[in-house]
Image: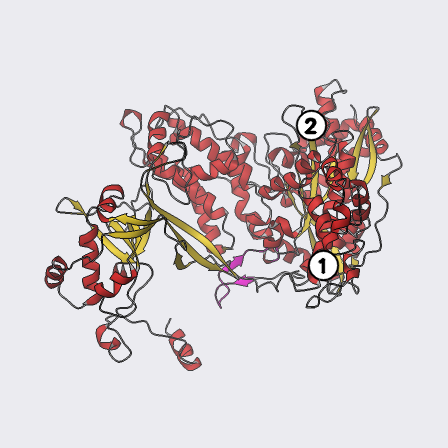
Amino acid sequence: MNATGQQDAVDECFSVASTSSAASASNRYEVGTRGSFESNAEPSESNWMPFRSKMDWDIARWAKTRDLTSTALDDLLSINGVVDALGLSFRTATQLNALVDQLPGRPSFKHEVVTIYGQEFSLYFRDIIPCIRELFGSPEFANDLVFAPEKLYLDAAKSIRVINEMHTGNWWWIVQTSLERQCPGTTVIPLIISSDKTQLTLFREKTAYPVYLTIGNIPKKIRRTLSRNAQMLIGYLPSTRLEHIQGKTARRRAMGNLFHGCIRRILAPIEPYGETGISMATGNGSWFCCHPILAAFIGDYPEQALVACTFYGRCPKCLVPPNQLGSFVRYPDRDHSNAYDVFSLADGDPKLFHTSCQMAGFRPIYQPFWLNLPYANIFISITPDILHQLHQGVIKHMVKWITDRKAFGPVEINARCRCLPPNHNLRVFSKGLTLLSRISGQEHKDMCRILLGLIVDLPLPENRSPRRLIHAVRAMLDFLYIAQYPSQTTATLQRLDEALRCFHDNKDIFVELGIRSNFNFPKIHSLLHYSSSIMLFGTTDNYNTEQSERLHIDFTKDAYRATNKKQEFKQMTKWVERQEKIHFHDAYIQRQTQAIHPLAPAPGLTQFPSVTQVELAQHPSVRSVRLYDIADKYGAVDFQDALADFVVHHNSPGLSAISARNLANNTLIPFTRVSVFHKIRFVGQMKDSEQTIDAAFAKPEQRDKDGNVVPGRFDTVLVSSGSSGQRVAQVRVVFQIPTRAASDLFTQPDPPTHLAYIEWFSPFPSEPDHRHSMHRITRTYKENRRVAQVVPFGPVVPRDWNASNVLDKCHTFYVNPFVNRDTHVILNSLN
């Protein structure tokens, strides 16, 4: 297909008259009539309209959100007396759909026909300007929107920059500065577009090609929360393979033109407003002059190459030669102005256009969709992809490399994998790593948690030193975890680049072992662009493809299952519209009684939850366990001795070691049974909610309901051991002292009743191992017995301390800088 043919085909694509759904009813949620955000009044009957009552609405919402088929709903409503008993305003699924269609919602989908080589294909899309207006003006986001870029710093000297949300990056700052020169007081609306073809069925080869939109003014936490509906489906592209075109080259070229032609049709309305601006109101009625500008395009590598019009196997962002993809060398970025000059030749001599594209390293696409978008640079807008570039890319390769027989081999790796003890945060790969098939991104995430531990101290064939291999694995894992920080600084980005350099410095060990011949593949080269993209657009959780992968479930797979599989995309768009209407009507009703979402916190470093309390179940897992079963089944062989030591230390903390030992030997435990808990929850506070940060299990071997043996599990935990800091211990049993016995054992008031029997590991060494930067610890033994101890939950102040003697009995203190403002200033000046 020559260039002239391409142009004719693309020009013909959108010549057919478009169709769209009928306009919805008057939008009572528009600015000025949305109702008070803080009203505490009960919704009136008019609020349920077009439904009769709360019951009528609740049944309708249940029917439309619980995957109930129309036939099943009709069968339910046809039962004699159901409709009248519930007071419903609909008697069939068709009548319910008619009521839902009256609700206000997001813009309706349009349908246009695309003609390629005489064959017609359907394009379903929404008008993007009303979509942007809907996101910017939604009452649900009114208190959270960001209108201007910011530069955050950790120190007064402004030497350490903080990057997290999109508005803290450089891209927004640069574009805002350029716009301010022409029109002061403007507001940038960064458009974040994502697209990805996805499978609808396993056997019938049905696919969908959804396109999603969100805006960078909405904080990333809201954008990533699916229930907040900050991501909008704006189109279904034709997912055809163009099998009616015979030549492979012509087919590939036509598919590229089809993609860009469709995206150009969807994004065309923003071209004039990127320069001139358009008035838009927020959900609380404030008006802004807004400039919608393409900021980021999210997709996997094939999608990135298609969007950038580059050849497969080339970097879509820079000019690195194909044989240098594996090097740690940064090459110049692709020049957008040069690309504009090349693609502007498409209307002229076809031979000159093809030659120019070949020389510049571009595929000959007629008018890429981004060519005329103001302030857009597609080569910068292509963002990192943690899921496909790291988890399903480099990490996937690394697992294969280290399990290769020329490295550590599958037998030993799988054996070590099977021996790992269970943990709340770890996945158990009971069959090892190499026997898995169709490994998902989540499974590769889980492998990363244990990968380094599997290879530590393993020898390489022929007595080679594994030092460089371990350095390479450790460096790549460091890169992966640092790249996912929800808040970055210039210091952490420097560590990110150092980790990547360390990997490249040591990666040749895989070549020397004969596992690889080179590293010239795009995914490993793409890691060079992570730090610059984070500085431009914020942290990677602003634009990870995991979000669009999750959106596929709601907007494509669920929508497809709701159809009768005939003309499915027409039904899918209608299903999406109705789901959105249900959501917005429900949100509107909720706003009548309370403010749904509080004001967003001031931007800054993302706060990580820390453990604030330890929680047990309300009732014990086993109410009565004999003490000899504690030793036999739970492995707490020194349980009574350790409990006696704890009682003595609690009652008489000032005794010498010898006196305490003698007193413990004479301490009688006045009970023979205890209640036992099999799970501990570590809870932390994160903003306004509590989260389970971790959990530990201490349960013996049991049998399930089918009589199968379930192995025991005794987790390891970090224990705060006073002046020694953190120390690792294994939890053997968590128990509760009988209430009556506690008063006999303890002489101090408020004795602890929930205790844990733990076995200590050695303290952390002063420095980690230089080979892999992990700390090596061992079991602690005394006279050939494991050192064990009974400990309470949480910090416990000695009961003999009080306000009059604490300065004499305690040896270590912290100076409080918050006594008053003068003290705060004086103490801070000492730092």
Residue type highlighted by circle 1: Ile
Residue that label 2 marks: 206
Residue drawn at 85 percent across, 41 percent down: 20
Q: Nearer the viewer, residue 531 or 49?
A: 49
Q: Which residues are magenta?
A: 152-167
| Distance Cα–Cα, label 1 vs label 2 | 38 Å
Q: Quadrant of the C terminus?
A: bottom left
Q: Of label 1 and label 2, which has the lower sequence position? A: 2
Residue 238 is situated, as x and y percent measured from the top left of the image, at: 75, 32
Q: Nearer the viewer, residue 74 or 498?
A: 74
Inspect the magenta stretch and tell me whether residue 162 lies in it. Answer: yes
Question: Residue 589 — which label?
Answer: 1
Q: Please say if the residues under marks 1 and 2 sit with CB atoms less than 8 Å apart.
A: no
Q: Quadrant of residue 508?
A: top left
Q: Nearer the viewer, residue 322 or 108?
A: 108
Decide: few, some or many residues near mark 2? Use Cα within 10 Å; few <14, some 14-19, many ≥20. some
Residue type highlighted by circle 2: Lys
Q: Nearer the viewer, mark 1 or mark 2?
A: 1
Q: Quadrant of residue 790?
A: bottom left
Here the colouring is secondary structure
Decide: few, some or many residues near mark 1? Use Cα within 10 Å; few <14, some 14-19, many ≥20. some
